[in-house]
Amino acid sequence: MRLSVYLAGEIHTDWRDAVIAACEGLEIDWSGPVTDHAASDDCGVEIFGAEEDKFWHDRKGASLNAIRIRTGIERCDVLVVCFGEKYKQWNAAFDAGYAAALGKSIIVLQPPEHDHALKEVDAAASAVARTPEQVARALRYVTTAKL
Amino acid sequence: MRLSVYLAGEIHTDWRDAVIAACEGLEIDWSGPVTDHAASDDCGVEIFGAEEDKFWHDRKGASLNAIRIRTGIERCDVLVVCFGEKYKQWNAAFDAGYAAALGKSIIVLQPPEHDHALKEVDAAASAVARTPEQVARALRYVTTAKL
Amino acid sequence: MRLSVYLAGEIHTDWRDAVIAACEGLEIDWSGPVTDHAASDDCGVEIFGAEEDKFWHDRKGASLNAIRIRTGIERCDVLVVCFGEKYKQWNAAFDAGYAAALGKSIIVLQPPEHDHALKEVDAAASAVARTPEQVARALRYVTTAKL
Amino acid sequence: MRLSVYLAGEIHTDWRDAVIAACEGLEIDWSGPVTDHAASDDCGVEIFGAEEDKFWHDRKGASLNAIRIRTGIERCDVLVVCFGEKYKQWNAAFDAGYAAALGKSIIVLQPPEHDHALKEVDAAASAVARTPEQVARALRYVTTAKL
Amino acid sequence: MRLSVYLAGEIHTDWRDAVIAACEGLEIDWSGPVTDHAASDDCGVEIFGAEEDKFWHDRKGASLNAIRIRTGIERCDVLVVCFGEKYKQWNAAFDAGYAAALGKSIIVLQPPEHDHALKEVDAAASAVARTPEQVARALRYVTTAKL
Amino acid sequence: MRLSVYLAGEIHTDWRDAVIAACEGLEIDWSGPVTDHAASDDCGVEIFGAEEDKFWHDRKGASLNAIRIRTGIERCDVLVVCFGEKYKQWNAAFDAGYAAALGKSIIVLQPPEHDHALKEVDAAASAVARTPEQVARALRYVTTAKL
Amino acid sequence: MRLSVYLAGEIHTDWRDAVIAACEGLEIDWSGPVTDHAASDDCGVEIFGAEEDKFWHDRKGASLNAIRIRTGIERCDVLVVCFGEKYKQWNAAFDAGYAAALGKSIIVLQPPEHDHALKEVDAAASAVARTPEQVARALRYVTTAKL
Amino acid sequence: MRLSVYLAGEIHTDWRDAVIAACEGLEIDWSGPVTDHAASDDCGVEIFGAEEDKFWHDRKGASLNAIRIRTGIERCDVLVVCFGEKYKQWNAAFDAGYAAALGKSIIVLQPPEHDHALKEVDAAASAVARTPEQVARALRYVTTAKL
């Protein structure tokens, strides 16, 4: 079974590369947000012109990034969302909620210390993984039907 | 007409192979659940870690399997669901209900002794077949427009 | 919070009465299938004329009953489905699948011996209860926000 | 215009009371999650039985709370979501994402220090408020068409 | 169970009155098209101005009538459609198709001589009745759960 | 038939009052945008704080007004949209497109000189009226089934 | 623009061949019902076993044919429906209604003598054609953007 | 990320060519309306026969053009809509509203003098561009994830 997988959340570690590498050979179409932090923050003003107010600076960027994010989530079969150690990561949880309302399957990648704080997200998910390798094994099982 | 067909239910006989073999040459994209009973039961704990409580052992597996099942049902044009002789097979009826709510066409494969117990499922179906060959003939007719 | 609750499945015990009685005073609109077994089986031929073939006798009844069942499920916020001791109960699982595809919240009422056979249904549910009182307590909590 | 408003997020301050009080006299139907933190955390095991593993303890509670939360969000016209000073509040962002995917109007109530971290949520919202009074004024304007 | 029922088709006999009379006392909200043939044909040009070309005369009327028809069908739980002895009645079949695509329950009222010509419509219906009394009995059964 | 009608477009003449007055006694629930031009333009900055840049001043207002507009359009059965003599009125056409995509019935109120420019909007509408009285007569016919 | 076109209705003349021939070279994916009248009537009993009652004989065939018909209509961008000289053709009108409810574009091919009887179907259509060549020209214009 | 982009609005300048040229090499599937003004105006009567009344002349053309327009909008991920200097351009705003209701991402291309008149359209958009080059840069960023 060919799958379309969106990799949401955390953009400061290489978990996406680890998942993708561990899924080599599988029929998976990957998508995800822009992971270059600076580009993601400044894309709006870079393209459409500077803003004095940081609030609108951020708005222009977030609105532009949303085109890629929503298109990716709407097309995917499975959203994998990783919650890392740093930052508020509200956009990761927002993406998970967005995917849940669309009926997408969700796999959450999280360290145990986040378990209580993520219980609502986890309850909407098909699986909670601790490592990129677990995510990859799950995707391998779903696509190949083999453990 | 190219068709996408999901083969649901019964995983202890070779009815899927029989249907697929009898449809050779047709433009059909097949999908279905994991049919290795042990893998299907244990996939959750194998990948994400053991559970002491059998209830959660089962939950982890069923949640993971649901990714493949729902993706397959949502993509299909026709769900063929087979009710066999053994087990409760509530998941087969659940899948049929899920497909019905999505407006999918359903073909039920069932022995006559199940007719009364399956009357609600049959009433939501496009056809009730007694043999894999009948299923295949129906799919051949739908895809080729020839009896 | 006013809730609309559909009580699906098992029609040979008084679990519906027990749930409704234990929810007295709550703002809940109840619905459910026809629970008179004979009427449910024969309604089709009684109203629209006899059938020689038991298969079509059943079809006429099941199709008519489906009007009430689907209307009820489509309107509900929560589907409570009870799996009892007897019969195949495929219609109960079918209704649960139908509700799941519509995004309804599901509470399953089942004895522990059905746990393994119902794992796919349970994985799509918000809660698994063992007694009508637990179902009622859950509904009370959801509607009143008080334990 | 009568409105249905869901008050999501933050349960440790009295912002809900402040909004509701400031909207007195308006035709607004309010809903929201269970705001008793202990009840919210323990409802699952209280009603359906204890769990040794905290992870499943949390799952049972979160799954039950989700019935109320999703029913409320699906019914609402406007979701107001408040991000407070404490906790991870991923469920608040998750609810906002869920509402966004359903096409609901969103008003975010947040302190300026969260502006950058909430830029993706804000970009999906109709308004960003700093105080409960601003939220109330906005709701008053929408329902009465008067500033 | 309160039902919303749309009475489609045939406007030259009193079958609607017969159904409604036989359902007295039931919780049913009735709707249907304009049944005054002349008004139905001429409403468009009467209100918005004459047309020289009969084709556009008809278009203006049919477009206006469609507001009432579609609103009624979209709101209903059950569409009862009667095929009479005269006229082409393509609008009746069109309304049935429209209702079927929306997932509405359909009851067809038809004389036996139309059985073969209506087989596709009947296959999408929950019941085929021969008399208004049968329609009423079916609706009584669905709303009261009693034969 | 009770109707919900949204009155979109033109806010500088009294066409809404004329339609509503001419519909006196009909079962119609009316809704529409804020028609106080100044309030509509300034609501965003009035409530949430001033903006130096007129572009964001406008954005804040338009986003807030959209809550009322979208809620009204999503609830309505019929959208009546009036194109007047002045201003660009792109929001009127935008609302009509929004309603069309939701499958709402549309009645356009326009002077003949706009016919060519509005041909795409008109082609998506159920009727094109020249006066508020014609709109009212059409609504009267739809709700009462009488010319 | 590549188009998917479903050719519904009339199966006793060669209008489908005429349309397809006149569209040679265009990027159009064609679909349609089984046009072999005998196969279409008898497919159900041929595959799944004979029925004594003609009513159920027809039902079995119509239900099986519906798989192909609904799959085709749901996939298409444009439904072309032809109303010929003979038969009741209620299935043609039913298919048009089904397509209309799904928001598909409809082109009706009909002789002028059917204009009044088809006014409701025409009012839901994008165009009314008199000849297969007109249908082909319209499809050519839509796909190539050239008259 | 491969994107499907619909270019709506303004057909009297070469902005479409400018955007497409500046996007050379990107994985974008382009669509848009017929941009030959004369063909667009007269296609209906050219193909289906002349009309005396200009109103119906326009209706026939607009209805036929709508097949291409709606198919394109429904398939796209991003609708770019350009508001030029001339004409009423209500169809451009109508298309934007249609896309907004379907949840499509929207980029508006407009001169600053239209800012106030377009504020409602802009508030539903992901970005407001001033030049075709900005549109192209945004699409490049979304598809390649690089500034």
Image (spheres, coloured by chain):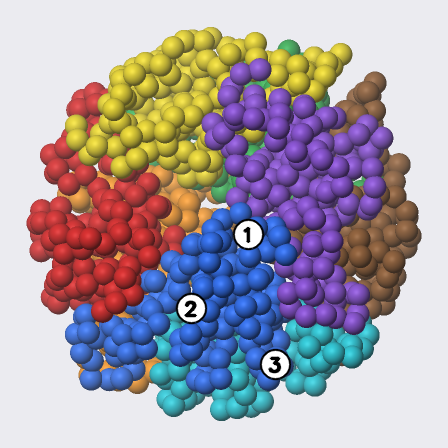
Chain colours: A green, B brown, C purple, D yellow, E blue, F red, G cyan, H orange
Crowd tier of the residue under label 2, counting other residues whose Cα lies within 10 Å: few below 14, some 14–19, many 20 or above = few
Where residue A3 appears, x then y in whole percent? 67, 44
Residue flagged by tag 2: what amino acid is it?
Answer: Asp
Image quarter of residue E54:
bottom left
Indicate the chain on which mark 1 is placed. E
On the image, numbered disc 3 is attached to which residue? Answer: E112
- Residue that badge 2 annotates: E17
When the figure is inspected, residue D74 is found, relative to residue A119, above or below; the finding is: below
Q: Earlier in the sequence, mark 2 or mark 1?
A: 2
Query: On screen, H146 above or below E23?
Result: above
Q: Mark 1 points at which residue?
A: E143
Residue type marked 1: Thr
Compared across the picture, whether G4 is left or right of F113 comes to right
Q: Residue G121, position in %: x, y?
A: 41, 74
Q: What element carries label 3?
A: helix
Mark 2 vs 3: CB contact within 8 A: no
Which is more toward the observer, G19 or G26?
A: G19
State the separation of the CA atoms marked 2 and 3: 22 Å
Determine whether E67 is above or below C69 in the image.
below
Q: Earlier in the sequence, mark 1 or mark 3?
A: 3
